[in-house]
Image: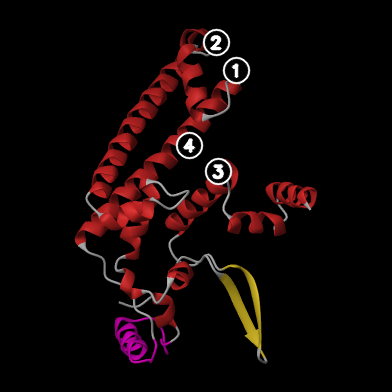
Amino acid sequence: MLNPRYVRSFVRTNKTDAADARAIWTAALQPGMPSVPVKTEAQQALLGLHRIRSELVDTRTRRVNQLRGLLGEFGLHFTAGRHAGLAEIRARREEIENAVPPVLWSALARQLDEIRREDEQILEIEREIANWLRSHPAGQTVEEIPGIGPITASALVATMGSAQAFRSGRAFAASLGLVPRQSGSGGKVQLGGISKRGDPYLRRLLIHGARIVLTRSRKRPAWAEALLARRPTPLGHQARHERLGRS
């Protein structure tokens, strides 16, 4: 299996089945052509659970934001945050019912019920993912990394397929688009921002995990302190001031 981006450059004419087959054959003959590791059925099934969960989370977020916006038009505002906001909405249900027209309230009540059902479905999928993780030592090993929980660990193991398909951890990071983009000419190579190639879902999970390490760890690792000291972010400025104060 080959990445379509590597095959496209070998298509010499318009896109047809015959041209695609010739391009795939030509690309496969190239020395050093990287291949896509084939996933097992179990890994494909687990990634299917992740896709369903991701869609449910996105739908729930849209419903909650829409609910806040519609109620805000009637002067009803609630605590920030999904858990706190929904709890306050349910606690003030009688007040909301009296403040908005009945034709709208019936639709809002159905939206609240849909959000509750989506919460239940998401929790059930997360339990299934946790059960899968308990029977896979590789996932448990990944879960021990700071900032990585059951969701990220299971997605990482299932997306990776076979670890032997990658020469190193950096090669796997490159497949996810987490290494700098390179541009070179005349023997000079310039590094830009991360390439953002590969699986955006797994990359998002890993970035969220790194953010948790940077913002909530009681004692951040040395690599995190060095990163914050040189990056122009509020956390980076704080780390730089702390370092200057200690010196």
The quarter of the displayed image where residue 155 is located? bottom left
Q: Which residues are magenta?
A: 10-32
Q: Which is nearer the N-term, disc 2 or disc 4?
A: 4
- The residue indicated by pointer 1 is 74
Q: Residue 160: where, in percent of width, then height? A: 34, 64
Numbered disc in front, either 4 or 1:
4
Disc 1 residue type (three-letter): Phe
| Secondary element at tag 4 | helix
Q: Is residue 80 above or below residue 224?
A: above
Whether pointer 2 and pointer 1 mark residues with C-beta atoms closer than 8 Å, the reply is yes
* Residue in view at x 34 percent, y 50 percent: 51
Q: Secondary structure at mark 1?
A: loop
Real-space Cα distance between discs 2 and 4?
A: 23 Å
Q: Decide which of tag 2 and tag 1 comes sooner along the chain.
A: 1
Q: CA distance from mark 3 to mark 4?
A: 30 Å
Camera-near label (2 vs 3) is: 3
Residue 14 appears in which quarter of the rendering?
bottom left
Q: Given the image, on which type of amino acid does mark 2 rest? A: Ala
Q: Which mark is residue 99?
A: 2
Q: CA distance from mark 2 to mark 3?
A: 43 Å
Quadrant assignment for the N terminus: bottom left
Spatial CA span between label 4 and label 1: 19 Å
Answer with the quarter of the image where residue 90 lies.
top left
How many residues crowd around disc 4 within 10 Å: few (fewer than 14), some, or many (20 or more)? few
Camera-side residue of 50 and 189: 189
Q: Which residue is mark 3?
A: 217
Q: Earlier in the sequence, mark 3 or mark 4?
A: 4
